[in-house]
Image (cartoon, rainbow, N blue to C red):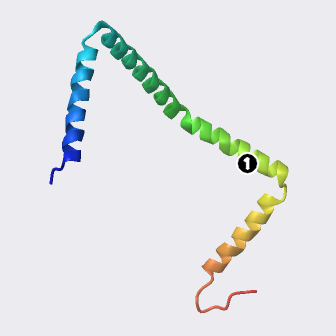
Amino acid sequence: MVNAKHLATFVLGAAAGVALNKYLQTEEGEKALADLKIKAGQFKDEAEQAIDKAPEYFEKLKTEATTALKDSFPDAEAFLQELFGKAKVATETPATEEPKV
């Protein structure tokens, strides 16, 4: 069902398209389009560099976080190993055997 609102939106969109086409055919419009292409190329290059650096960045972040955790909480590693060690033993206990408390 097409109502007046939809028709007005279509007409305005078509008018904007015609106006943009006319503008891009001017010298100023061509310059703006060329600038836009340059900016898009720069953005693409930056994005590709960021993707290439991502694994290195996350490895550095992991190392720094580990160091900070060890410096701030020196007993945290032993605590976590003990905690997860107990959890691992509990999950490996057969169902017929009573869990040790």
Say few, some or many: other residues with alpha carbon within 10 Å of mark 1 (under 14 / 14 to 19 / 20 or more). Answer: few
Query: In the figure, is residue 21 to the left or right of 51?
Result: left
Q: Secondary structure at mark 1?
A: helix
Which residue sits furthest front? 4
**Residue drawn at 47 percent across, 30 percent down:** 47
Q: Quadrant of residue 99?
A: bottom right
Q: Quadrant of residue 61?
A: top right
**Residue drawn at 20 percent across, 31 percent down:** 14
Query: In the figure, is residue 56 to the left or right of 19?
Result: right
Quadrant into which the C terminus falls: bottom right
Which residue sits furthest top? 27
**Measured from the top left, where is residue 42 in percent x and y?**
45, 20
**Measured from the top left, where is residue 55 in percent x and y?**
56, 38
- Residue beneath disc 1: 66
**Residue drawn at 74 percent across, 64 percent down:** 80
**Measured from the top left, where is residue 36 in percent x and y?**
38, 19
